[in-house]
Image (cartoon, rainbow, N blue to C red):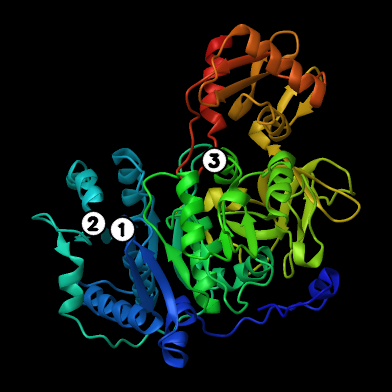
């Protein structure tokens, strides 16, 4: 959607949305390429054995046609929800494209979900079909009787007695299918929020969500779609980061995508994979980038061919930004958004739009501001809530069966994010923290991000999270939960040293007065720290 340019402001000023009357994501990412360049590489799937399977756009499209026919034969109709409990791989892409061809709604679910998380989402969405693997079948067997709306279970592995075979269904189906004509606002995709606060909500998007993502994703990859580009992300294809920050934009632009079904993120292996597959473009969430720091001398050890690396999902932080730039010679393009409205702020190093500690500027086509509780736009350098003005193509249609929550997401025409931030005079936004993550201590309002960024600069610290703990004198004190690097021993002396380090490097009012060493931090399946659980622990201690 963007033409390569050398001036960001000119690019932004000249940009105009032009949404077609009809639009279907299956046509955008599959049908169009199958027709005009059928042998173009779509997906390169790396198996655990190291063997590689290449899928052309024609092969991907014909398989999606077969599965769409199979689903129609099972009674799937327009608007029905199809749950996908699958890791990265061709079958996941096939199932998504088939769902969109039918006018159905894809409901991706993370493979790491336990049975309670699955039961809630499957029940809340009213999914009619689920496509999964052997691991998913085991979890489903424990909750199957409670899923009254679920009619068909389809397995990409050897099916159980109550599941159909994905491959057998496709083998019996025709490889031609006429994609339904849909409008940009017709429902296509429902992604459940990660649940950092309250019960997860189904975020319903129309087919236009892909168009809405394109400017921000193209910029984050320094104009993705250049000759030789090939993209990989460790992000699960069950969340917006993996699907809409990587897989779908790449397929739409004809950029091959490398997939690998990892059970957990291994930083050493990640570098090997990117070297072996000659990855030019990567979307790597901040938590994964921080874990990559544990690998010694990666720039010298691995022959990487990176042209661009984008990152989003939580604040990257100045320390990780600086480390990456120093190690690899170019900066990470950090960008920002939410499941409800993504890629609205961003960076583009190729245009000189990059700044340590900032999450970028408003990307072309999106109006973003810092507002107060009344919806008034605040001047630069004011702390307030990050908000996006509607209408916006990337903005969600609403929360599934939750009109009250949808209404509460807006102040007038501003969609509020629940994220506190500041915009400077140059238009760069800085993330301060979630509304409910803000720590109030001795009249200071403290965001955890800056503290955590400082904590991981300490040589003994691998990961850290900061929360407010109730205190009768200061309202709250800063408490840090710290995961140490291997071979580091926790003790009072080290805790004191870490406190002094933050006091020295950050400020006297922001250092953690309490430090608790833990073996791991509670995280969502998308790699975000669930500070809510840590706050609950701190409050329980205080009481």
Residue topped by disc 3: 528
Q: Are marks 1 and 2 in contact (CB under 8 Å)?
A: yes
- Whether residue 413 appears in this view of the structure is no
Point out the frontmost of discs 2 and 3: 3
Neighbour tally class for label 3: few under 14, some 14-19, many 20 plus, Cα within 10 Å = some
- Residue 119's disc is none
Tell whether 317 sits left or right of 127.
Answer: right
Q: Are marks 1 and 3 in contact (CB under 8 Å)?
A: no
Neighbour tally class for label 1: few under 14, some 14-19, many 20 plus, Cα within 10 Å = many
Q: Quadrant of residue 310?
A: bottom right
Residue at figure coordinates x 75%, y 55% from the top left: 360
Residue 515: % across, % down: 62, 15
Quadrant of the snapshot with the N terminus:
bottom right
In this view, the residue in front, 345 or 276, is 276
Q: Earlier in the sequence, mark 1 or mark 2?
A: 1
Q: Earlier in the sequence, mark 1 or mark 3?
A: 1
Residue topped by disc 1: 127
- Whether residue 97 appears in this view of the structure is yes
């Amino acid at each position: 959607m963007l033409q390569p340019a050398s001036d960001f402001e000119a690019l932004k000023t000249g940009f105009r949305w032009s949404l077609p009357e009809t639009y279907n994501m299956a046509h955008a990412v599959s049908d169009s390429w199958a027709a005009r360049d059928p042998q173009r590489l779509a997906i390169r799937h790396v198996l655990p054995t190291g063997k590689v399977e290449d899928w052309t756009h024609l092969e991907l499209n014909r398989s999606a046609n077969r599965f769409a026919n199979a689903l129609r034969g099972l009674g799937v109709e327009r608007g029905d929800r199809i749950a996908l409990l699958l890791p990265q791989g061709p079958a996941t892409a096939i199932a998504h494209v088939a769902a969109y061809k039918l006018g159905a709604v894809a409901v991706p679910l993370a493979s790491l979900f336990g049975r309670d998380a699955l039961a809630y989402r499957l029940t809340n969405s009213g999914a009619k079909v689920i496509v999964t693997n052997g691991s998913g079948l085991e979890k489903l067997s424990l909750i199957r009787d409670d899923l009254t709306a679920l009619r068909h279970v389809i397995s990409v592995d050897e099916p159980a007695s109550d599941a159909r075979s994905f491959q057998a269904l496709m083998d019996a189906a025709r490889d031609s299918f006429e994609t339904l004509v849909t409008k940009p606002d017709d429902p296509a995709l429902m992604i459940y929020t990660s649940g950092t606060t309250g019960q997860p909500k189904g975020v319903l998007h129309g087919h236009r969500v892909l168009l809405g993502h394109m400017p921000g994703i193209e910029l984050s990859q320094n104009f993705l779609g250049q000759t030789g580009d090939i993209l990989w992300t460790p992000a699960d294809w069950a969340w917006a980061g993996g699907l809409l920050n990587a897989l779908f934009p790449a397929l739409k632009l004809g950029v091959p995508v490398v997939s690998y079904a990892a059970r957990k993120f291994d930083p050493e292996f990640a570098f090997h994979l990117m070297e072996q597959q000659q990855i030019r473009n990567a979307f790597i969430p901040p938590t994964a980038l921080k874990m990559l720091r544990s690998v010694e001398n990666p720039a010298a050890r691995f022959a990487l061919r990176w042209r661009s690396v984008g990152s989003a999902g939580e604040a990257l932080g100045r320390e990780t930004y600086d480390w990456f730039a120093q190690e690899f010679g170019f900066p990470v393009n950090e960008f920002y958004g939410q499941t409800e409205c993504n890629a609205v702020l961003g960076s583009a190093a190729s245009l000189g739009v990059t700044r340590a500690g900032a999450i970028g500027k408003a990307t072309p086509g999106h109006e973003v501001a810092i507002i107060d509780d009344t919806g008034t736009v605040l001047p630069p350098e004011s702390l307030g809530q990050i908000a996006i003005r509607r209408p916006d193509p990337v903005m969600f249609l609403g929360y599934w069966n939750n009109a009250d929550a949808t209404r509460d997401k807006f102040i007038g025409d501003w969609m509020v994010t629940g994220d506190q931030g500041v915009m400077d005079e140059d238009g760069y936004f800085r993330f301060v923290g979630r509304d409910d993550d803000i720590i109030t201590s001795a009249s200071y309002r403290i965001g955890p991000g800056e503290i955590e960024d400082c904590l991981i600069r300490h040589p003994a610290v691998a990961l850290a999270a900061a929360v407010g703990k109730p205190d009768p004198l200061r309202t709250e004190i800063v408490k840090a939960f710290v995961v140490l690097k291997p071979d580091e021993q926790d003790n009072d002396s080290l805790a004191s040293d870490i406190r002094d380090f933050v006091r020295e490097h950050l400020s006297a009012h922001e250092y953690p007065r309490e430090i608790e060493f833990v073996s791991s931090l509670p995280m969502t399946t998308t790699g975000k720290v669930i500070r809510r659980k840590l706050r609950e622990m701190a409050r329980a201690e205080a009481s």
